[in-house]
């Protein structure tokens, strides 16, 4: 904390602190898509979308008849025809685009966009080998910005009800998917302008033609959306990985460590992963204190994909086992949310609430990639700042609302239980049920392959320099090869990234096959 007792320190654990005239915390993509669409309808000059993934085929809002097409790709084409002078810029991670670029509908839409002078699409290859562009930011006329964890892509839409069956949870090809929990923020004012500057810088670094800042844009806050905060200071924290001709930024890593150290009573978090050694070490120090805070982390039962569970779930098990040894007072709990019918709800939200003082929402998870390898962007509201001094009730209310959602009760009952018990853990245990509820995480047994992958951090390295360290002792040779993966301008070719991803996948697959062979031979 600085001399004034506040958490945020530009240049250390945040990039900037800017004023926001209004801020809303938006839970789940149903409300996000509606709000983003309504804000875009008001744009006059510029819309910038920077993300890990983007799929033009998804339904986008569509619950209000505003005259535009339902699918996001058609909506943008319609919107620029409707609004002469409006420029739409879409920047997405290049490697992740491979899986969607060859859909027939996507190719047709891309051809239409290529002919449209008002829509500009770039694939971002400026990241280290096996790294990704993971920010999820939308800026509209430098007046309103969205920053959080929700991508405009398939499998993200859901409501806070997280029903067992919902016909709207359907991929473009008609395939149904399960319940999904996520979060973002909507911000108005100078903080939105700063996020716009960040996005335009990223566009330029990716090789795009420089964009100008917006002047005389529209007022884009959507009608009917009530803010949670008004006239507050908001911190912007970044992760920018180390690369040739690029200075790294590890503000989010420093922020997480400071948040753990700052906690007095309750550390509540939602994260897709729990695999960061640095975050775990910081938590371990606090758990050993006789009167330290309690730590509650809500996350999915398992990571998505076929490789991620091997790395992330194994690393989680290792960290939790280690933390148990440092938790003599039993103040650490990890939980998974389930539907009323007993189906797991996938947690993609990245939210942290410290006591009733600090709220963080963004794109970063508690894993090494988010702290060192990928590009990330989080926003932070600290009630210890003078401008934010009256926001403690709001911050606690957002946490209570999330707990109420997961436990199928009301925020008022959660508030009363925490006031009575002084404990989030005791409150969760009071409201646990066999239906819609939070269930405790249980450490699984790790086979030899998963243990090896977790120990070597093959799929979750602590930065670009560690990508190869678990694979070979010949570090000087590998170190001399790494610069050749960069272009002269410091960016990385999509081919290099794809080859690296395939190589890592091959290592993991080979390790799995070897372990199976050894078990068979025995």
Image (spheres, rainbow, N blue to C red):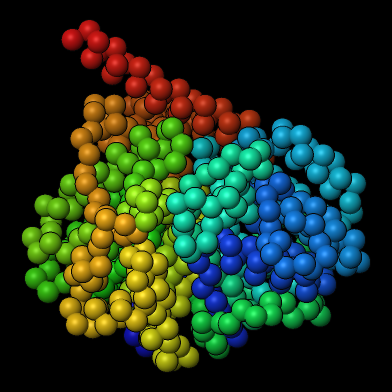
Q: Nearer the viewer, residue 140 or 29?
A: 29
Q: Position of residue 229 (x, y in %)?
A: 51, 84
Identified at 38% across, 30% down, the residue is 475
Identified at 48% across, 91% down, the residue is 387
Counting the numbered discs, the total is 0
Q: Position of residue 35 (x, y in %)?
A: 65, 70
- In this view, 263 is above or below 245: below
Q: Position of residue 86 (x, y in %)?
A: 85, 66
Q: Nearer the viewer, residue 424 or 144?
A: 424
- In this view, 204 is above or below 144: above
Q: Quadrant of residue 433?
A: bottom left
**Residue 409: in sight, yes or no?**
yes
Q: Quadrant of residue 290?
A: bottom left
- In this view, 256 is above or below 54: below
**Which quarter shows the C terminus?**
top left
Identified at 24% across, 78% down, the residue is 418
Q: Quadrant of residue 466?
A: top left
Identified at 34% across, 50% down, the residue is 342
The answer to whether 135 appears left or right of 2 in the picture is right
The answer to whether 288 appears left or right of 72 in the picture is left
Q: Position of residue 179 (x, y in %)?
A: 47, 52
**Residue 425: in sight, yes or no?**
no
């Amino acid at each position: 904390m600085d001399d004034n007792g506040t958490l945020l320190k530009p240049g250390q654990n945040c990039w900037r602190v800017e004023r926001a005239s209004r801020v809303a915390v938006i839970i789940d993509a149903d409300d996000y898509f509606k709000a983003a669409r309504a804000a875009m309808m008001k744009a006059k000059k510029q819309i910038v979308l920077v993300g890990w993934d983007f799929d033009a085929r998804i339904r986008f809002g569509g619950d209000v008849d505003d005259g535009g097409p339902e699918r996001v790709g058609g909506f943008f084409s319609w919107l620029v025809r409707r609004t002469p002078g409006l420029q739409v810029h879409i920047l997405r991670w290049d490697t992740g685009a491979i899986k969607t670029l060859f859909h027939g509908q996507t190719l047709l839409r891309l051809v239409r966009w290529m002919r449209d002078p008002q829509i500009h699409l770039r694939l971002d290859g400026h990241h280290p080998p096996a790294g990704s562009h993971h920010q999820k930011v939308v800026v509209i006329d430098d007046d309103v910005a969205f920053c959080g964890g929700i991508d405009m892509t398939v499998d993200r839409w859901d409501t806070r009800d997280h029903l067992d069956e919902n016909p709207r949870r359907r991929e473009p090809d008609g395939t149904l998917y399960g319940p999904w929990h996520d979060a973002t923020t909507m911000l108005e004012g100078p903080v939105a302008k700063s996020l716009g500057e960040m996005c335009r810088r990223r566009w330029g670094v990716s090789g795009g033609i420089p964009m100008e800042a917006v002047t005389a844009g529209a007022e884009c806050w959507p009608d009917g959306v009530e803010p949670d905060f008004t006239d507050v200071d908001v911190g912007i924290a970044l992760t920018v990985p180390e690369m040739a001709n690029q200075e790294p930024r590890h503000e989010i890593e420093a922020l997480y460590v400071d948040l753990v150290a700052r906690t007095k009573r309750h550390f509540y978090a939602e994260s897709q992963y729990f695999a960061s050694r640095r975050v775990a070490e910081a938590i371990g120090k606090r758990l050993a204190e006789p009167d330290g805070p309690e730590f509650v982390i809500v996350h999915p039962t398992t990571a998505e994909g076929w490789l991620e569970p091997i790395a992330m779930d194994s690393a989680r098990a290792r960290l939790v086992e280690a933390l148990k040894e440092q938790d003599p007072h039993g103040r650490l709990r990890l939980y998974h949310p389930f539907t009323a019918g007993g189906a797991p709800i996938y947690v993609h939200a990245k939210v942290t609430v410290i006591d009733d003082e600090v709220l963080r929402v963004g794109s970063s998870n508690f894993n090494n990639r988010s702290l060192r390898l990928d590009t990330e962007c989080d926003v932070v509201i600290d009630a210890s700042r003078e401008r934010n001094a009256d926001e403690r009730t709001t911050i606690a209310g957002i946490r209570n609302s999330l707990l109420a959602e997961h436990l199928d009760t009301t925020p008022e009952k959660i508030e009363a239980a925490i006031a009575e018990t002084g404990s989030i853990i005791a409150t969760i245990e009071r409201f646990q049920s066999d239906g819609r509820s939070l269930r405790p995480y249980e450490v699984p047994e790790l086979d030899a392959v998963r243990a090896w992958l977790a120990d070597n951090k093959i799929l979750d390295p602590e930065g670009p320099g560690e990508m190869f360290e678990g694979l070979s002792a010949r570090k000087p040779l590998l170190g001399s090869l790494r610069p050749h993966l960069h272009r002269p301008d410091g960016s990385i070719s999509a081919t290099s990234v794809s080859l690296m991803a395939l190589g890592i996948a091959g290592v993991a697959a080979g390790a799995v096959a070897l372990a199976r062979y050894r078990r068979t031979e025995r």
